Image (cartoon, grey):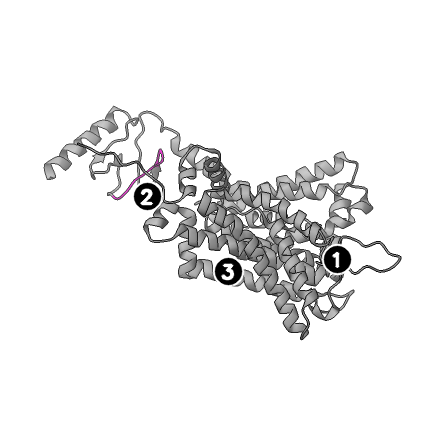
Amino acid sequence: MSVQIPFRPKDPAAGAARSGGPLGSVDRAARALLAPTRSGSSPLAVAVVTVLTVAAALGITAGLVAIVGGAPGEVFSSMLDGSVGTPGAFSQTLLEATPLLLVAVGSCVSSRAGVFNIGQEGQMLIGASVGAYVGLRTQGPPAVVLTLTLVCSALGGALWAAIPAVMRYRRGVDVVVSTLLMIFIAEQLVSFVVSKPWLLQETRVSGQIVAPQSNALAPSFRLPTLGDYPGLTISLGAFLAVGLAIVVAVLLARSRWGFRLRMLGHNPLAARHAGVREATFGGLALALSGAFSGLAGGVVLTGEVYRLQPGMSDNYGWDGLLVALVARDNPIAAVPTALVFGALRSGGGVLASTGVPAYLIDITQALLVFAFVLPPALLALWRSTADRRPPPPGRHLHLRPGRRVRGRRVTGGHGGRGTHGANGAYRAYGECGARGAGRGERGDRREGQRR
Protein backbone atom coordinates (compact mmCIF):
# COMPACT_ATOMS: atom_id res chain seq x y z
CA MET A 1 0.00 0.00 0.00
CA SER A 2 1.44 3.35 -1.00
CA VAL A 3 1.18 6.32 1.29
CA GLN A 4 1.33 9.81 -0.18
CA ILE A 5 2.91 12.43 2.03
CA PRO A 6 1.91 15.98 1.09
CA PHE A 7 4.74 18.44 0.52
CA ARG A 8 5.01 21.13 3.16
CA PRO A 9 7.43 23.99 2.54
CA LYS A 10 9.79 24.81 5.37
CA ASP A 11 8.72 28.42 5.46
CA PRO A 12 5.54 30.24 4.38
CA ALA A 13 7.51 32.49 2.03
CA ALA A 14 8.74 29.53 0.03
CA GLY A 15 5.20 28.24 -0.34
CA ALA A 16 3.93 31.63 -1.46
CA ALA A 17 6.71 31.94 -3.99
CA ARG A 18 5.99 28.48 -5.43
CA SER A 19 2.28 29.14 -5.68
CA GLY A 20 0.65 31.33 -8.24
CA GLY A 21 -0.68 33.74 -5.62
CA PRO A 22 -0.05 37.47 -5.47
CA LEU A 23 2.95 37.17 -3.14
CA GLY A 24 4.73 34.83 -5.51
CA SER A 25 3.88 37.16 -8.39
CA VAL A 26 5.47 40.12 -6.62
CA ASP A 27 8.56 38.05 -5.85
CA ARG A 28 8.88 36.99 -9.47
CA ALA A 29 8.39 40.57 -10.65
CA ALA A 30 11.14 41.83 -8.35
CA ARG A 31 13.55 39.10 -9.44
CA ALA A 32 12.72 39.81 -13.08
CA LEU A 33 13.56 43.46 -12.49
CA LEU A 34 16.93 42.51 -11.05
CA ALA A 35 17.63 39.76 -13.61
CA PRO A 36 18.77 42.08 -16.43
CA THR A 37 21.45 43.49 -14.15
CA ARG A 38 23.14 40.09 -14.17
CA SER A 39 23.24 39.71 -17.93
CA GLY A 40 26.07 37.67 -19.38
CA SER A 41 26.70 40.04 -22.31
CA SER A 42 30.18 41.29 -23.02
CA PRO A 43 31.12 44.57 -21.29
CA LEU A 44 31.95 46.21 -24.62
CA ALA A 45 28.51 45.46 -26.07
CA VAL A 46 26.82 46.72 -22.91
CA ALA A 47 28.92 49.92 -23.01
CA VAL A 48 28.09 50.62 -26.66
CA VAL A 49 24.37 50.09 -26.17
CA THR A 50 24.45 52.17 -22.97
CA VAL A 51 26.02 55.10 -24.81
CA LEU A 52 23.29 54.90 -27.44
CA THR A 53 20.47 54.74 -24.90
CA VAL A 54 21.91 57.61 -22.84
CA ALA A 55 22.18 59.71 -26.00
CA ALA A 56 18.56 58.85 -26.80
CA ALA A 57 17.50 59.83 -23.26
CA LEU A 58 19.27 63.18 -23.52
CA GLY A 59 17.74 63.73 -26.94
CA ILE A 60 14.25 63.09 -25.55
CA THR A 61 14.98 65.49 -22.69
CA ALA A 62 16.09 68.18 -25.15
CA GLY A 63 12.89 67.65 -27.12
CA LEU A 64 10.76 68.03 -23.98
CA VAL A 65 12.62 71.23 -23.06
CA ALA A 66 11.90 72.61 -26.52
CA ILE A 67 8.22 71.65 -26.21
CA VAL A 68 7.77 73.64 -22.98
CA GLY A 69 9.34 76.68 -24.61
CA GLY A 70 12.92 76.50 -23.35
CA ALA A 71 16.26 76.44 -25.10
CA PRO A 72 17.93 73.02 -24.62
CA GLY A 73 21.45 74.46 -24.79
CA GLU A 74 20.70 77.11 -22.20
CA VAL A 75 19.00 74.64 -19.87
CA PHE A 76 21.83 72.10 -20.03
CA SER A 77 24.41 74.86 -19.54
CA SER A 78 22.55 76.20 -16.49
CA MET A 79 22.28 72.73 -14.96
CA LEU A 80 25.99 72.17 -15.53
CA ASP A 81 26.89 75.48 -13.91
CA GLY A 82 24.54 74.81 -11.00
CA SER A 83 26.02 71.39 -10.30
CA VAL A 84 29.76 71.51 -11.08
CA GLY A 85 30.36 74.98 -12.49
CA THR A 86 31.74 76.52 -9.29
CA PRO A 87 33.35 75.11 -6.14
CA GLY A 88 30.23 75.95 -4.17
CA ALA A 89 28.01 74.19 -6.69
CA PHE A 90 30.19 71.08 -6.64
CA SER A 91 30.09 71.13 -2.84
CA GLN A 92 26.29 71.03 -3.02
CA THR A 93 26.51 68.13 -5.47
CA LEU A 94 28.69 66.17 -3.03
CA LEU A 95 26.25 66.99 -0.23
CA GLU A 96 23.34 65.65 -2.28
CA ALA A 97 25.25 62.56 -3.43
CA THR A 98 26.30 61.40 0.05
CA PRO A 99 22.92 60.08 1.31
CA LEU A 100 22.17 58.72 -2.16
CA LEU A 101 25.34 56.64 -2.04
CA LEU A 102 24.61 55.31 1.44
CA VAL A 103 21.09 54.25 0.46
CA ALA A 104 22.39 52.69 -2.77
CA VAL A 105 25.04 50.63 -0.96
CA GLY A 106 22.40 49.23 1.37
CA SER A 107 20.16 48.44 -1.60
CA CYS A 108 23.05 46.58 -3.24
CA VAL A 109 23.40 44.36 -0.17
CA SER A 110 19.72 43.39 -0.04
CA SER A 111 19.41 42.98 -3.82
CA ARG A 112 22.42 40.65 -3.94
CA ALA A 113 20.55 38.44 -1.49
CA GLY A 114 17.43 38.48 -3.67
CA VAL A 115 15.50 40.74 -1.26
CA PHE A 116 14.04 43.80 -2.98
CA ASN A 117 13.82 46.53 -0.32
CA ILE A 118 11.91 49.65 -1.39
CA GLY A 119 11.26 51.12 2.06
CA GLN A 120 14.37 53.32 2.28
CA GLU A 121 12.33 56.50 2.75
CA GLY A 122 10.78 55.24 5.95
CA GLN A 123 14.03 53.73 7.20
CA MET A 124 15.74 57.09 6.69
CA LEU A 125 13.06 58.87 8.70
CA ILE A 126 13.20 56.40 11.57
CA GLY A 127 16.99 56.52 11.63
CA ALA A 128 16.95 60.31 11.69
CA SER A 129 14.36 60.26 14.50
CA VAL A 130 16.45 57.97 16.68
CA GLY A 131 19.57 59.98 15.89
CA ALA A 132 17.84 63.27 16.72
CA TYR A 133 16.64 61.89 20.06
CA VAL A 134 20.15 60.76 20.97
CA GLY A 135 21.79 63.96 19.72
CA LEU A 136 19.40 66.23 21.61
CA ARG A 137 19.20 64.27 24.86
CA THR A 138 22.85 63.20 25.25
CA GLN A 139 25.63 65.32 26.73
CA GLY A 140 29.31 64.61 26.41
CA PRO A 141 32.33 65.13 24.19
CA PRO A 142 31.25 66.25 20.69
CA ALA A 143 33.01 63.37 18.92
CA VAL A 144 31.34 60.80 21.20
CA VAL A 145 27.88 62.32 20.84
CA LEU A 146 28.24 62.61 17.06
CA THR A 147 29.36 58.98 16.81
CA LEU A 148 26.48 57.82 19.00
CA THR A 149 24.05 59.83 16.89
CA LEU A 150 25.18 58.17 13.66
CA VAL A 151 25.38 54.68 15.16
CA CYS A 152 21.91 54.96 16.70
CA SER A 153 20.56 56.26 13.39
CA ALA A 154 21.87 53.12 11.69
CA LEU A 155 20.40 50.92 14.44
CA GLY A 156 17.03 52.63 14.11
CA GLY A 157 16.94 51.99 10.36
CA ALA A 158 18.05 48.38 10.87
CA LEU A 159 15.32 47.71 13.44
CA TRP A 160 12.69 49.28 11.19
CA ALA A 161 13.81 47.07 8.29
CA ALA A 162 13.90 44.02 10.56
CA ILE A 163 10.13 44.19 10.97
CA PRO A 164 9.45 43.31 7.28
CA ALA A 165 12.21 40.69 7.54
CA VAL A 166 10.40 38.95 10.40
CA MET A 167 7.10 39.15 8.55
CA ARG A 168 8.74 37.75 5.44
CA TYR A 169 10.40 34.71 6.98
CA ARG A 170 7.85 34.00 9.72
CA ARG A 171 4.52 34.71 8.03
CA GLY A 172 5.38 34.82 4.32
CA VAL A 173 4.52 38.51 3.84
CA ASP A 174 6.13 39.87 0.69
CA VAL A 175 9.05 42.23 1.31
CA VAL A 176 8.12 44.62 -1.50
CA VAL A 177 4.65 45.16 -0.08
CA SER A 178 5.65 45.35 3.59
CA THR A 179 8.59 47.73 3.13
CA LEU A 180 6.46 50.01 0.97
CA LEU A 181 3.67 50.17 3.54
CA MET A 182 6.14 50.76 6.35
CA ILE A 183 7.03 54.08 4.70
CA PHE A 184 3.60 55.52 5.47
CA ILE A 185 3.77 54.30 9.07
CA ALA A 186 7.18 55.95 9.48
CA GLU A 187 5.90 59.25 8.10
CA GLN A 188 2.99 59.31 10.53
CA LEU A 189 5.23 58.29 13.41
CA VAL A 190 7.70 61.10 12.74
CA SER A 191 4.85 63.61 12.44
CA PHE A 192 3.61 62.45 15.84
CA VAL A 193 7.06 62.65 17.43
CA VAL A 194 7.69 66.26 16.35
CA SER A 195 4.22 67.38 17.47
CA LYS A 196 4.53 66.36 21.14
CA PRO A 197 6.50 68.54 23.58
CA TRP A 198 7.45 65.53 25.69
CA LEU A 199 9.11 63.91 22.68
CA LEU A 200 10.98 65.97 20.09
CA GLN A 201 8.86 69.05 19.41
CA GLU A 202 10.91 72.24 19.40
CA THR A 203 10.90 74.39 22.49
CA ARG A 204 8.00 76.83 22.62
CA VAL A 205 8.94 80.51 22.56
CA SER A 206 6.41 83.11 23.63
CA GLY A 207 4.95 85.04 20.73
CA GLN A 208 6.08 82.53 18.10
CA ILE A 209 4.33 79.67 16.35
CA VAL A 210 5.72 76.24 17.12
CA ALA A 211 6.57 74.37 13.93
CA PRO A 212 6.33 70.56 13.64
CA GLN A 213 10.07 69.99 13.96
CA SER A 214 12.69 69.37 16.63
CA ASN A 215 15.24 71.70 18.07
CA ALA A 216 18.43 72.19 16.09
CA LEU A 217 21.47 70.13 16.97
CA ALA A 218 24.27 71.95 18.73
CA PRO A 219 26.97 73.14 16.30
CA SER A 220 29.54 70.93 18.02
CA PHE A 221 27.38 67.84 17.35
CA ARG A 222 27.31 68.31 13.57
CA LEU A 223 29.42 66.65 10.91
CA PRO A 224 32.66 68.60 10.32
CA THR A 225 33.61 69.78 6.85
CA LEU A 226 36.86 70.36 5.04
CA GLY A 227 37.17 73.78 3.42
CA ASP A 228 35.23 77.01 3.74
CA TYR A 229 32.40 78.50 1.71
CA PRO A 230 32.38 79.82 -1.06
CA GLY A 231 35.27 77.48 -1.80
CA LEU A 232 35.07 73.72 -2.04
CA THR A 233 33.68 72.12 1.12
CA ILE A 234 33.56 68.36 1.66
CA SER A 235 31.61 66.87 4.55
CA LEU A 236 32.94 64.00 6.61
CA GLY A 237 29.86 62.08 5.53
CA ALA A 238 31.14 61.90 1.95
CA PHE A 239 34.34 60.15 3.08
CA LEU A 240 32.26 57.85 5.28
CA ALA A 241 29.96 56.91 2.38
CA VAL A 242 32.79 56.18 -0.06
CA GLY A 243 34.70 54.15 2.55
CA LEU A 244 31.65 52.04 3.35
CA ALA A 245 31.02 51.46 -0.36
CA ILE A 246 34.55 50.09 -0.78
CA VAL A 247 34.25 47.89 2.32
CA VAL A 248 30.91 46.45 1.22
CA ALA A 249 32.21 45.80 -2.30
CA VAL A 250 35.20 43.86 -0.93
CA LEU A 251 33.03 41.86 1.46
CA LEU A 252 30.53 40.95 -1.25
CA ALA A 253 33.25 39.86 -3.65
CA ARG A 254 35.88 38.29 -1.38
CA SER A 255 34.31 37.08 1.85
CA ARG A 256 32.51 33.86 2.70
CA TRP A 257 29.52 35.88 3.84
CA GLY A 258 29.37 37.66 0.50
CA PHE A 259 29.59 34.39 -1.41
CA ARG A 260 26.69 32.91 0.52
CA LEU A 261 24.70 36.09 0.08
CA ARG A 262 25.20 36.05 -3.68
CA MET A 263 24.39 32.34 -3.80
CA LEU A 264 21.12 33.05 -2.04
CA GLY A 265 20.28 35.78 -4.51
CA HIS A 266 21.07 33.71 -7.59
CA ASN A 267 19.38 30.46 -6.56
CA PRO A 268 17.63 30.18 -3.18
CA LEU A 269 16.95 26.45 -3.62
CA ALA A 270 20.60 25.63 -4.32
CA ALA A 271 21.65 27.88 -1.44
CA ARG A 272 19.39 25.97 0.96
CA HIS A 273 20.83 22.66 -0.23
CA ALA A 274 24.34 24.10 0.34
CA GLY A 275 23.48 24.91 3.96
CA VAL A 276 22.74 28.63 3.60
CA ARG A 277 19.92 29.61 5.93
CA GLU A 278 17.61 31.81 3.92
CA ALA A 279 15.97 33.43 6.92
CA THR A 280 19.32 34.26 8.55
CA PHE A 281 21.13 35.66 5.53
CA GLY A 282 18.09 37.22 3.87
CA GLY A 283 16.93 38.85 7.10
CA LEU A 284 20.44 40.10 7.85
CA ALA A 285 20.73 41.57 4.34
CA LEU A 286 17.44 43.41 4.75
CA ALA A 287 18.47 44.71 8.19
CA LEU A 288 21.82 45.90 6.79
CA SER A 289 20.01 47.69 3.99
CA GLY A 290 17.88 49.45 6.58
CA ALA A 291 20.99 50.29 8.60
CA PHE A 292 22.55 52.06 5.63
CA SER A 293 19.32 53.96 5.01
CA GLY A 294 19.11 54.93 8.68
CA LEU A 295 22.73 56.08 8.53
CA ALA A 296 21.84 58.19 5.50
CA GLY A 297 19.11 59.79 7.60
CA GLY A 298 21.64 60.47 10.35
CA VAL A 299 24.05 62.04 7.83
CA VAL A 300 21.28 64.32 6.50
CA LEU A 301 20.40 65.24 10.08
CA THR A 302 23.93 66.04 11.24
CA GLY A 303 25.33 67.39 7.98
CA GLU A 304 22.55 69.22 6.17
CA VAL A 305 19.24 69.84 7.99
CA TYR A 306 20.40 69.81 11.66
CA ARG A 307 16.87 69.15 12.97
CA LEU A 308 14.21 66.47 12.59
CA GLN A 309 11.46 67.35 10.13
CA PRO A 310 8.72 65.16 8.63
CA GLY A 311 9.85 65.81 5.05
CA MET A 312 13.59 65.69 5.60
CA SER A 313 14.02 62.47 3.59
CA ASP A 314 13.31 64.56 0.45
CA ASN A 315 13.10 61.52 -1.87
CA TYR A 316 16.65 60.47 -0.99
CA GLY A 317 15.38 56.93 -0.45
CA TRP A 318 13.71 56.65 -3.84
CA ASP A 319 16.63 58.27 -5.68
CA GLY A 320 19.12 56.08 -3.83
CA LEU A 321 17.20 53.01 -4.92
CA LEU A 322 17.45 54.24 -8.51
CA VAL A 323 21.19 54.75 -8.05
CA ALA A 324 21.58 51.10 -7.02
CA LEU A 325 19.45 50.00 -9.96
CA VAL A 326 21.54 52.00 -12.44
CA ALA A 327 24.77 50.77 -10.82
CA ARG A 328 23.53 47.17 -11.30
CA ASP A 329 23.95 46.34 -7.61
CA ASN A 330 27.66 47.21 -7.68
CA PRO A 331 28.73 49.38 -4.71
CA ILE A 332 31.78 50.71 -6.57
CA ALA A 333 29.72 51.69 -9.61
CA ALA A 334 27.26 53.38 -7.25
CA VAL A 335 29.87 56.06 -6.41
CA PRO A 336 29.93 57.81 -9.82
CA THR A 337 26.22 57.09 -10.30
CA ALA A 338 25.42 58.86 -7.04
CA LEU A 339 27.50 61.83 -8.23
CA VAL A 340 25.43 62.02 -11.43
CA PHE A 341 22.15 61.93 -9.52
CA GLY A 342 23.49 64.42 -7.00
CA ALA A 343 24.40 66.75 -9.86
CA LEU A 344 20.87 66.42 -11.23
CA ARG A 345 19.42 67.30 -7.83
CA SER A 346 21.70 70.28 -7.24
CA GLY A 347 21.50 71.50 -10.84
CA GLY A 348 17.72 71.28 -10.85
CA GLY A 349 17.53 74.23 -8.48
CA VAL A 350 18.58 76.65 -11.22
CA LEU A 351 15.92 75.57 -13.72
CA ALA A 352 13.50 78.21 -12.45
CA SER A 353 15.82 80.92 -13.76
CA THR A 354 15.54 79.47 -17.29
CA GLY A 355 11.74 79.35 -17.29
CA VAL A 356 11.62 75.55 -17.49
CA PRO A 357 9.45 73.53 -15.05
CA ALA A 358 11.42 71.84 -12.29
CA TYR A 359 9.62 68.52 -12.82
CA LEU A 360 11.75 67.97 -15.91
CA ILE A 361 14.50 66.88 -13.52
CA ASP A 362 12.36 63.93 -12.44
CA ILE A 363 11.68 63.06 -16.08
CA THR A 364 15.40 63.26 -16.85
CA GLN A 365 16.19 60.95 -13.93
CA ALA A 366 13.59 58.44 -15.10
CA LEU A 367 14.94 58.50 -18.66
CA LEU A 368 18.51 58.00 -17.42
CA VAL A 369 17.42 55.06 -15.28
CA PHE A 370 15.83 53.44 -18.33
CA ALA A 371 18.92 54.25 -20.39
CA PHE A 372 21.24 52.45 -17.96
CA VAL A 373 18.98 49.52 -17.10
CA LEU A 374 17.68 48.61 -20.56
CA PRO A 375 20.96 47.69 -22.38
CA PRO A 376 21.52 44.30 -20.66
CA ALA A 377 17.86 43.40 -21.18
CA LEU A 378 17.98 44.43 -24.85
CA LEU A 379 21.15 42.41 -25.44
CA ALA A 380 19.65 39.37 -23.72
CA LEU A 381 16.51 39.67 -25.86
CA TRP A 382 18.57 39.99 -29.04
CA ARG A 383 20.71 36.98 -28.07
CA SER A 384 17.68 34.80 -27.33
CA THR A 385 16.09 35.81 -30.64
CA ALA A 386 19.26 34.95 -32.53
CA ASP A 387 19.48 31.56 -30.82
CA ARG A 388 15.93 30.68 -31.82
CA ARG A 389 16.37 31.66 -35.46
CA PRO A 390 16.59 28.46 -37.59
CA PRO A 391 19.51 28.12 -40.03
CA PRO A 392 18.84 28.35 -43.77
CA PRO A 393 17.81 24.97 -45.27
CA GLY A 394 20.53 22.99 -47.03
CA ARG A 395 23.35 24.59 -45.06
CA HIS A 396 25.52 22.86 -42.48
CA LEU A 397 26.43 24.18 -39.08
CA HIS A 398 30.07 24.38 -38.11
CA LEU A 399 29.89 24.29 -34.34
CA ARG A 400 32.48 24.64 -31.66
CA PRO A 401 32.18 23.56 -28.05
CA GLY A 402 30.48 26.29 -26.04
CA ARG A 403 28.28 27.65 -28.84
CA ARG A 404 24.54 27.84 -28.23
CA VAL A 405 22.03 26.49 -30.74
CA ARG A 406 18.36 27.17 -30.07
CA GLY A 407 19.10 27.76 -26.42
CA ARG A 408 21.08 24.48 -26.08
CA ARG A 409 24.79 24.51 -25.48
CA VAL A 410 27.28 22.35 -27.43
CA THR A 411 29.38 20.52 -24.86
CA GLY A 412 32.67 18.90 -25.83
CA GLY A 413 33.51 17.21 -29.12
CA HIS A 414 35.90 17.72 -31.97
CA GLY A 415 34.23 20.26 -34.27
CA GLY A 416 32.72 19.60 -37.66
CA ARG A 417 29.13 19.60 -38.82
CA GLY A 418 26.24 18.83 -36.57
CA THR A 419 25.85 18.96 -32.79
CA HIS A 420 26.80 16.61 -30.02
CA GLY A 421 23.99 14.96 -28.14
CA ALA A 422 23.93 14.16 -24.46
CA ASN A 423 25.42 10.68 -25.06
CA GLY A 424 28.39 11.97 -27.04
CA ALA A 425 27.09 10.77 -30.43
CA TYR A 426 27.73 12.97 -33.44
CA ARG A 427 24.25 14.06 -34.54
CA ALA A 428 23.20 16.34 -37.36
CA TYR A 429 20.95 19.31 -36.75
CA GLY A 430 17.40 18.49 -37.90
CA GLU A 431 17.03 21.33 -40.39
CA CYS A 432 20.40 21.14 -42.13
CA GLY A 433 19.12 19.18 -45.13
CA ALA A 434 19.26 15.53 -46.15
CA ARG A 435 22.98 15.58 -46.80
CA GLY A 436 23.82 16.83 -43.33
CA ALA A 437 21.39 14.36 -41.78
CA GLY A 438 22.99 11.48 -43.71
CA ARG A 439 26.41 12.43 -42.46
CA GLY A 440 25.05 12.65 -38.94
CA GLU A 441 23.54 9.17 -39.20
CA ARG A 442 26.81 7.72 -40.53
CA GLY A 443 28.54 9.39 -37.62
CA ASP A 444 26.09 7.75 -35.23
CA ARG A 445 26.74 4.33 -36.80
CA ARG A 446 30.51 4.77 -36.58
CA GLU A 447 30.14 5.81 -32.95
CA GLY A 448 28.06 2.72 -32.24
CA GLN A 449 30.62 0.47 -33.91
CA ARG A 450 33.42 1.97 -31.83
CA ARG A 451 31.41 1.30 -28.69
Instruction: Work out whether residue 107 can be spotted.
Output: no
Task: Read off the residue under disc 2.
Answer: 402
Residue 44 image point, x, y percent = 49, 48
Which image quadrant: the C terminus? Answer: top left
Which element type, helix, strand or loop, lies under badge 3?
helix
Helix, strand, or loop for circle 2?
loop
- What's drawn in magenta, residue-wise? 405-412
Considering the image in quadrants, where does the N terminus appear?
A: top left
* Location of mark 1 (residue): 197
Alpha carbon separation for disc pair 1 and 3 = 40 Å
Please check the rendered image and state whether residue 410 is part of the magenta-colored stretch, yes or no. yes
Furthest toward the bottom, the residue is 141
Provide the residue designation for mark 3: 248
Label 3 crowd (10 A; few <14 / some 14-19 / many >=20): many
Is the C-beta separation of discs 1 and 2 under 8 Å? no
Drawn side of residue 120 relative to residue 69, left or right:
left
Q: Nearer the viewer, residue 10 or 432?
A: 10
Position of residue 65 measured from the top left corner of the image (x, y, whole percent): 74, 38
Q: Earlier in the sequence, mark 3 or mark 2?
A: 3
First along the sequence among labels 1 and 3: 1
At label 1, the amino acid type is Pro
* Residue 139, above or below 18: below
Name the residue: 35% across, 47% down.
270
Camera-nearest residue between 116 and 341: 116
